[in-house]
Image (cartoon, rainbow, N blue to C red):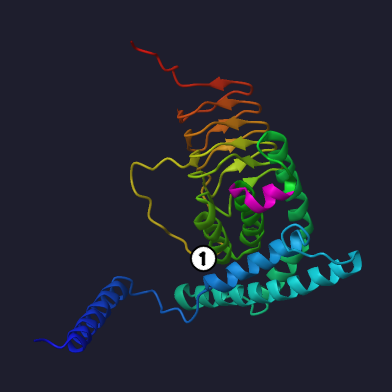
Amino acid sequence: MSDPDEDRRRAIDHATRSLATARMAWRQAQPSRRHPADFPRRAPIARAVELLADALFPARIGGFTGTTGGEDAFVAALLTDALALLDAAITAEFAYWRDAAGIDAATDRPAEIVQLFAGTLSRVRALLDTDVAAIFRGDPAARSVDEILICYPGATAILHHRLAHELDALGAPIVARIVSEIANERTGIDIHPGATIGPGFFIDHGTGVVIGETAVIGARVRLYQHVTLGARTPHRSQPRTESGPSAERVARHPIVGDDVVIYAGATILGRVMIGDRAVIGGNVWLLQDVAAGSVIMQPEAVVVG
């Protein structure tokens, strides 16, 4: 009879050797790539976002119940911890770009990004207030703005995006992408940090929504579940010529005007323009511009028998 412990040890030894072979093959296929010494870690970034959400909404999300003066001290303590975590994450990102891609940057750049990011938080809060107000106006099921902040996946996704977008714009794209993927994991809503989204944004239900990197969304836009604002796949693969936080971005996603409504399952691909006040019906597949005020619909279903 075989020894289970010995069998397990042999299996682990075999798996370890096989993984070493796989790693070596991958590294040999990329001879110019150096082994990175560091990389931003997901758990501290997730904690930083939790602290930032508490600081943005200290009573509703953070649970603060004290006096107004105490509220400022509460927020300051949250920001101190959150920004320290972000500083460490961005420092790790810059170490990664330096070690893996040979991209050098000033050693004080992470601290500068964190300081500039802190300066954006009042604008982020003001934008989030417009988003929550839009959801409350647009959803008869909403009983309060507090319920929206705590329970609505669309509100959670846009809160993460507003923070991620600022980090991305300031030059920390990996940390920003991790923030967006934390929201994706929680809500099923995938918004690239590079997407530009105006005030009063409302994602109703939200599961399966995808918004690409160079999408531009105007004010007071409403999306329903499973909407895609994506890019068209080129007929021939385009080789990547740049990497790093400042790599050029090709405008390849839709531009959506103000007061647009896009219903469930619609797919809009490429750098098309959706004019102000347009309505895009459910399950529409769209590859061309839409004039302002237009209504684009699938043929209505027919009852047979």
> What segment is highlighted magenta in the picture?
146-153
Identify whether 138 is placed above or below 96. above
Marks counted in the figure total: 1
Q: Is residue 236 left or right of residue 18?
A: right
Report whether residue 120 is seen. no
Residue drawn at x 75%, y 60% as measured from the top left: 56
For label 1, the SS is loop
Categorize mark 1 by other alpha carbons within 10 Å: few (<14), some (14-19), many (20+).
Answer: some
Q: Is residue 159 left or right of residue 188?
A: right
The N terminus appears in which quarter of the rendering?
Answer: bottom left
Q: Is residue 26 left or right of residue 73?
A: left
Report whether residue 146 is seen. yes
Residue drawn at x 76%, y 58% as measured from the top left: 57
Residue drawn at x 48%, y 75% as measured from the top left: 102
Q: Amino acid at mark 1?
A: Gly
Q: In the figure, residue 94 lies in which quadrant?
A: bottom right
Nearest the viewer among 56 and 4 is: 4
The picture places residue 60, in percent across and down from the top left corner, at: 75, 57
Identify whether 203 is placed above or below 125. above
Nearest the viewer among 128 and 31 is: 128
Nearest the viewer among 137 and 24 is: 137
The picture places residue 137, in percent across and down from the top left corner, at: 72, 35
* 167 in magenta: no
* 147 in magenta: yes
Q: Main secondary structure of the magenta part?
A: helix
Q: Which residue is mark 1?
A: 244
The picture places residue 167, in percent across and down from the top left corner, at: 64, 62
Identify whether 228 is placed above or below 87. above
The picture places residue 87, in percent across and down from the top left corner, at: 65, 75
The C terminus appears in which quarter of the rendering?
Answer: top left
Residue drawn at x 53%, y 49% as measured from the top left: 189
